[in-house]
Image (spheres, rainbow, N blue to C red):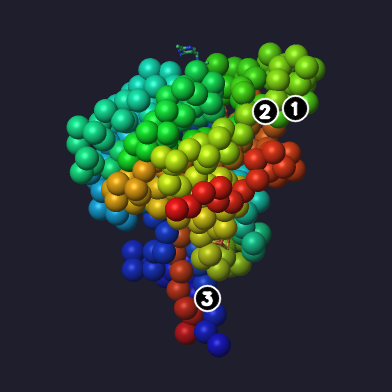
Amino acid sequence: MAKIRGAVTIDEEKCKGCSLCVASCPADVLSLQPKEVNNRGYHYAFMSSPEKCIGCASCAMVCPDACIEVYRVKEP
Amino acid sequence: MDINDIIKPENRVYKRPALLNDTHMHYCPGCSHGVVHKLIAEILEEMNAEDKAIGVAPVGCAVFAYNYIDVDFIEAAHGRAPAVATAIKRLQPDKLVFTYQGDGDLAAIGTAETIHAANRGENIAIVFINNAIYGMTGGQMAPTTLLGMKTATTPYGRRADLNGYPLAISNLVAQLDGACYVTRQSVHTPAAVRKAKAAIRKAFENSMAGKGTSLVEIVSTCNSGWKLPPVQANEWMKEHMFEKYPIGDLKNV
Ligand SMILES: Cc1ncc(C[n+]2csc(CCOP(=O)(O)OP(=O)(O)O)c2C)c(N)n1
Ligand code: SF4
Ligand code: SF4
Ligand code: SF4
């Protein structure tokens, strides 16, 4: 069976580190940067386990700042 | 497969809506207002209503909605959005006219405008963000504040004997003959976001079809006013808000 692979891009400067995307991801892909902050001082979100992403867009749907875009492919 | 083989334009399945301006929104981290703005921008884009839509912004945290959603907007005085929307829609019946209002705006100072616009059956859509508090002014009690809920003006919790009862204004609006569609939604999970989007779209279509007044209440969080981190605020909302403000359609004719 073809495997679904996904990936997201996160607009680091728009991210406010609210963590709603982290909580809504069913595959534990996302985390907040533990030390790094953006220009506004927020610990922005990033893909800490990118290989687990299934491209479901749950994170993007709940993001209040529309930071996340989602990509999905069927791995041959 | 390398991540760069996945992140390509042809594989994109979710994008930032084109009608959401490329600017930083002033809302607190995790605020429901942002999610609902995004939904409105998505819907207007999908309906090709960019040049047809006219929004009416409230007084409250969403006072700058016109800076974020890239369609025509008018800023109404506090609570008066349904009256302003009435005039717009009557003068330009071919426009998609919607208001965007918080619970202080819609259910306190603007109660008369809300009730009478719906009772007249104005062909407008009302998007109602119920976070049970006055967010903008520092978290004071709203008519929608839950019993026992602590706010800046009810530091020991809202008391029925002193402060009256939480006002489920959507239930009142649903009683009115002019209201065609009244529903209560939320945006705390991906599934809820999808349903809220379908509800707002239906309300917008009703405005175009001239079916009467539609009201979409979004049970929301105000992390700053509630003094909770965003994820916990969602949990608190599920546990406490949905009891008084249950999700689902109140009227659909
Ligand atoms: C005529 C008038 N009265 C009072 C105010 C002060 N005021 C500004 S916003 C607001 C309430 C906002 O609460 P809500 O509508 O729930 O929106 P939120 O900020 O929670 O999104 C009040 C009372 C005002 N601006 N104008
Ligand atoms: S697209 Fe789905 S799996 Fe991938 S990060 Fe977002 S929520 Fe997680
Ligand atoms: S939901 Fe959006 S703003 Fe919040 S942490 Fe995730 S990317 Fe950042
Ligand atoms: S005060 Fe409340 S309603 Fe206003 S932006 Fe902050 S979280 Fe949102």
* Front position in the image: A31 or B60: B60
Which is more foreground, mark 3 or mark 1?
1
Asked whether A26 or B4 is in front, the reply is A26
Q: Amino acid at mark 2?
A: Pro
- SS for callout 2: loop
Q: Position of residue B36 (x, y in %)?
A: 47, 42
Residue B34: image x %, image y %?
48, 39
Q: Residue at x 62, y 57 (%)?
A: A25
Looking at the rendered structure, whether the residues under marks 3 and 2 are on a common chain is answered as no
User: Are the residues tagged 1 and 2 within 8 Å (C-beta)?
Assistant: yes
Look at the picture and state if B68 lies above or below B159: below
Q: Which residue is mark 3?
A: A4
Which residue type does callout 1 highlight? Leu
Q: Give how far apart the Cα atoms at labels 1 and 2 are.
A: 7 Å
Separation (CA) of disc 3 from disc 1:
47 Å
Residue underneath mark 1:
B147
Q: Residues within 10 Å of mark 1 (few under 14, many from 20)?
A: some
The local secondary structure at tag 3 comes to: strand
Question: The disc numbered 2 marks a residue on which chain?
Answer: B
Q: Which residue is mark 2?
A: B166
Name the residue: 52% across, 55% down: B195
Q: Nearer the viewer, residue A56 or A35?
A: A56
What is the number of callouts on the image? Answer: 3
Q: Amino acid at mark 3?
A: Ile
Q: Mark 3, chain letter?
A: A
Q: Secondary structure at mark 1?
A: loop
